[in-house]
Image (tube, rainbow, N blue to C red):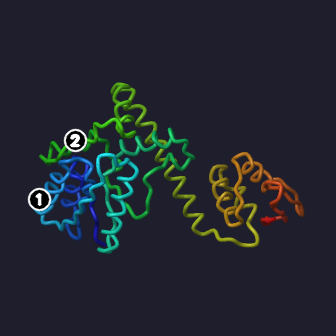
Amino acid sequence: MKKILAVSGGVDSMVLMHMMHKDNPEGLIVAHFDHGIRQNSADDYNFVEREAKKLGLKFIGTHAKLGVNCSEDKARMARYEFLRTCARNNNAKIYTAHHSDDIVESIIINILRGTGWRGLSPMRSSDIGRPLSNLSKADIYRYAAKNQIVFRQDQTNNDEKYLRNRIREWLISLGTERSTDLKLKLFEKYITQRNLAIEIDEILAEIKQKPNYSRRFFKNLDSRTAAEILRHILRFYDISLTRPQLSRALDAICTFPTNSRFSLNGSNFMYFSRHTFSVESVKN
């Protein structure tokens, strides 16, 4: 399968391009999205195109002209729309240069925005590969220096109007020791939550709306996994519960006697047999 490399011209993506070219250059396509946020952004476009051709790689680029007032979220959405179009047109998978520092910054952003538990395992799109995710920014700089990789500096990385840049500066202000310790702890949390999310997604992929669900199945799950799966099942019935309501429902699955019922939210119920339970959604 072909691979679309998202290359901005910065150190991360230039390292990605050189690493993947060194590993296996077959089927690599370099894609560059010029946001048009900076006046000199076309210079990045020309730089990436030139470096890709030096390596003998196919280059695809576009000029978006989003303007200086474009938000971080809008720019990201436009970039991924371009990348996914490239992937569809070339029957390819997307690869980006996100590293462990990027993941940690995304976790902090999600926490500030009031994330649920899935916000602790960001960047998990199935159509995007992230080969550098176990490397730190320092690792990437060391690789670039060792291999004499040229790159461009994005001036917007210093613009404090972007939340990610402010978080980056805050981490630096903590000092090397505290910052490194915090990053390590958050990345460890990311690994744990990512594995949990993968496990849950695999189970959810097999779950379909059906008359009855196994009580034993839920009894054998840990509480977080069970809650997420039950939440997913209840969506089939257009039922949305708070976290305490979900917890009480799980307790009922484990403890309620045969031929009993449990009120989910006053108008919707779970009915229990000895080994299974069913859900009835009562609509007015």
Q: Earlier in the sequence, mark 1 or mark 2?
A: 1
Q: Position of residue 132 (x, y in %)?
A: 31, 51
Residue at the spot x=16%, y=66% of the render?
Answer: 57
Name the residue tied to disc 2.
141
Q: In the rendered view, would you say 161 is above or below 20?
A: above
Does residue 117 appear anywhere in the picture?
Answer: yes
Q: Amino acid at mark 1?
A: Arg
Q: Nearer the viewer, mark 1 or mark 2?
A: 1
Query: Which quadrant of the rendered structure holds the N terminus?
Result: bottom left
Residue extending farthest to the right is 259
Please tell me how crowded label 2 is: few (under 14), some (14-19), or many (20+) other residues with Cα within 10 Å.
some
Where disc 1 sits, the SS reads helix
Q: Position of residue 204 (x, y in %)?
A: 60, 64
**35 sits left or right of 147 in the view:** right
Give 77 or 124, whichever is nearer the viewer. 77
Where disc 2 sits, the SS reads helix
Q: Position of residue 76 (x, y in %)?
A: 36, 53
Q: Position of residue 252 (x, y in %)?
A: 80, 53
Residue at the spot x=28%, y=54% of the render?
Answer: 35
**Number of numbered discs visible in the structure rendering:** 2
Rendered image: mark on residue 40: none
Q: In the rendered view, would you say 148 is above or below 273?
A: above
Residue at the spot x=72%, y=56% of the render?
Answer: 219
C-beta proximity under 8 Å, tags 1 and 2:
no
**193 sits left or right of 21 in the view:** right
Give the CA separation, mark 1 to mark 2. 21 Å
Query: Which quadrant of the rendered structure holds the C terminus?
Result: bottom right
Q: Amino acid at mark 2?
A: Tyr
**236 sits left or right of 195 in the view:** right
Give 21 or 57, whichever is nearer the viewer. 57
Name the residue tied to disc 1.
50
Q: Where, by quadrant of the figure, is residue 6 drawn?
A: bottom left
